[in-house]
Amino acid sequence: MEPRIEFLEETKLIGKKTIMSLADNKTMQLWQSFMPQKTKIENVINSELYSVEVYNDDTSFESFNPTTTFEKWAAVAVNSFESIPEGMDTHTLPTGQYAVFPYKGKASEAFGTYQYIYKNWLPNSEYMMDNRPHFALMGEKYKGEHPDSEEEFWIPIKKKS
């Protein structure tokens, strides 16, 4: 599985966030809280949903620990932070290069794809992980737990020195 390499321009997001770990996964509650409120967001660019993970500088994917906490976002892209609905926050994805991996299948079964990315593809590529947010981009073909669901995993990268 080879990704496409994309350069992402700075992207403004509005959504909801929580602190969680994989051992204390709050993804479902976050999205259940966000989706009914999504229509209150103005200046939305498109219909895509962003599931963003912001890790600490010292998070190491080589020595995976399921109790490591990170910030998780459920968000949409906007062209302005002019109006922010009550109970929501803003986040900006910084400009940078990403390896984009398409994924087809149930959202709950994506772990094997992530394992391949971090344990096989990344160490054997000409890239290393960059310290920027990771995200899944869910468009019209995203169907959650349906086996035909499609989404993309955006992994921040930079050339190895």
Image (cartoon, rainbow, N blue to C red):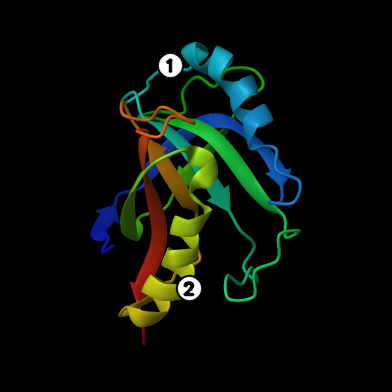
The structure residue drawn at horizontal position 51% and vertical position 17%, both measured from the top left corner, is: 38
Tag in front: 2 or 1:
2
Q: Nearer the viewer, residue 127 or 141?
A: 141
Q: Nearer the viewer, residue 26 or 10?
A: 26
Whether 90 is drawn above or below 52: the answer is above
Q: Position of residue 114 (x, y in %)?
A: 48, 59
Q: Position of residue 56 (x, y in %)?
A: 64, 62
Local secondary structure at mark 2: helix
Residue for badge 2: 119
Q: Please name the amino acid that badge 1 sits on.
A: Glu
The structure residue drawn at horizontal position 57% and vertical position 13%, both measured from the top left corner, is: 36
Res 96 quadrant in image: bottom left
Whether 158 is drawn above or below 28: the answer is below
Q: Position of residue 156 (x, y in %)?
A: 41, 61
Q: Please name the amino acid that badge 2 sits on.
A: Lys
Q: Position of residue 115 (x, y in %)?
A: 50, 64
Q: Is residue 71 left or right of residue 130?
A: right
Q: Residues within 10 Å of mark 1 (few under 14, many from 20)?
A: some
The structure residue drawn at horizontal position 41% and vertical position 27%, both measured from the top left corner, is: 143
Q: Residues within 10 Å of mark 2 (few under 14, many from 20)?
A: few
* Whole-number angstrom distance, CA of label 2 to CA of label 1: 40 Å
